Image (spheres, rainbow, N blue to C red):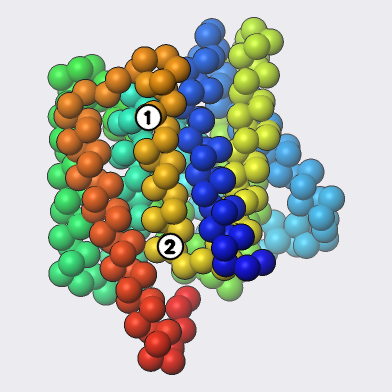
Amino acid sequence: MQVRHAVYFVLLSGVLNSFSGLILRSVEHASEWQIILYRTGAFSLTLIVVFVVRDPEIFFSGVRRMGFWGLVCGGLFCSMQTMFVFSLSNTTVANTVFILSSGPILTAFLARLVLREPIGRRTWTVLIMALLGTAIMMLEGLRSGTFLGNFAAAAGAASFAGFVVILRARRRVDMMPSVVVGGCLATVVAFVFSGGNTNVPAGDALRCIFWGGALSTLVLILFTIASRQLRGAELTLLLMLEYFLAPFWVWAFIDELPSGATFVGGAIVLSAVAAQAYMSNARDKAALDAGGSVP
């Protein structure tokens, strides 16, 4: 694959994923746990079929080799999926995607604590910016009654950071099966907390199945393929398209308009993410120019 094709894949995955908030808003009767149950169930089943059809031996051996940290990754992925739905259900789509967008910056901070990766002064600056923007939105959530949704988004961003740091630490092991494990775990948890109640209107069930089994699966496949050709900073910058489109869709179709505080906090967070990605990209290019390599 050429680099320009990888760019197209990332942009397409961002556009497709930006419809998540709009799909959830179209669900009329299903509860959060029922949405998670149908969405992650369809997602997990589709991925299993894809992996088994592609090469069953590699998939099942990968499940056996991922070990304890693969299970931890699965737990974090389960948290990401669960918190995402709870956030979308309890706050605006803009709040959710803006807070979640701080994930790459939190990853840099967590990598410093766990992997001893250095953090420069500029990175500390963007980290403080991201925390400031998130704090503005969290405080706005306290006033508007959407704190639970904002908190769920922050928990989702933290889960993402932990997931990525473990992937870095275990880069010699294929951790993709942990995504399937995480999806299955989320499905089981949702089934338990929904009281085993799978009785939802057919329209709601079909929306959630399409969301998980088609949309989320396609997004993951496109992103995984493209990530082999692009650096992390480039991926982050390209995915920012999703953060802008997601609030636009719900505003255009269902007139959901974020508050002024959300725009201010979100602008600060997105500026910090863009700055972090730009600095990482410049650092990677300098390493390549010096004859080094970028992990």
Residue holding disc 1: 247
Q: Is residue 37 something one can see in this rendering?
A: no
Mark 1 Cα-neighbour bin, 10 Å: few <14, some 14–19, many ≥20: many
Using the image, determine if residue 217 lies above or below residue 36. below
- What amino acid type is highlighted by mark number 2? Glu
Could you give the CA–CA distance between mark 2 and mark 1, rounded to whole angstroms?
Answer: 22 Å
Residue holding disc 2: 234
SS type, badge 2: helix
Residue at 53% across / 9% down in the picture? Answer: 28
| Quadrant holding the N terminus | bottom right
The answer to which quarter of the image holds residue 219 is top right
Which is nearer the N-term, disc 2 or disc 1? 2
Residue at 30% across / 20% down in the picture? Answer: 257
Looking at this view, is 102 or 73 the one in front?
102
Q: Is residue 221 something one can see in this rendering?
A: yes
Left or right relative to 279: residue 52: right
Residue at 50% across / 62% down in the picture? Answer: 167
Looking at this view, is 35 or 102 the one in front?
102
Q: Are marks 2 and 1 in contact (CB under 8 Å)?
A: no
Relative image position of residue 70 (x, y in whole percent): 57, 57
Using the image, determine if residue 104 lies above or below residue 219. below
Relative image position of residue 151 (x, y in whole percent): 29, 32
- What amino acid type is highlighted by mark number 1? Pro
Mark 2 Cα-neighbour bin, 10 Å: few <14, some 14–19, many ≥20: some
Left or right relative to 179: residue 148: left
Relative image position of residue 218 (x, y in whole percent): 65, 43
Looking at this view, is 23 or 193 the one in front?
23
SS type, badge 1: helix
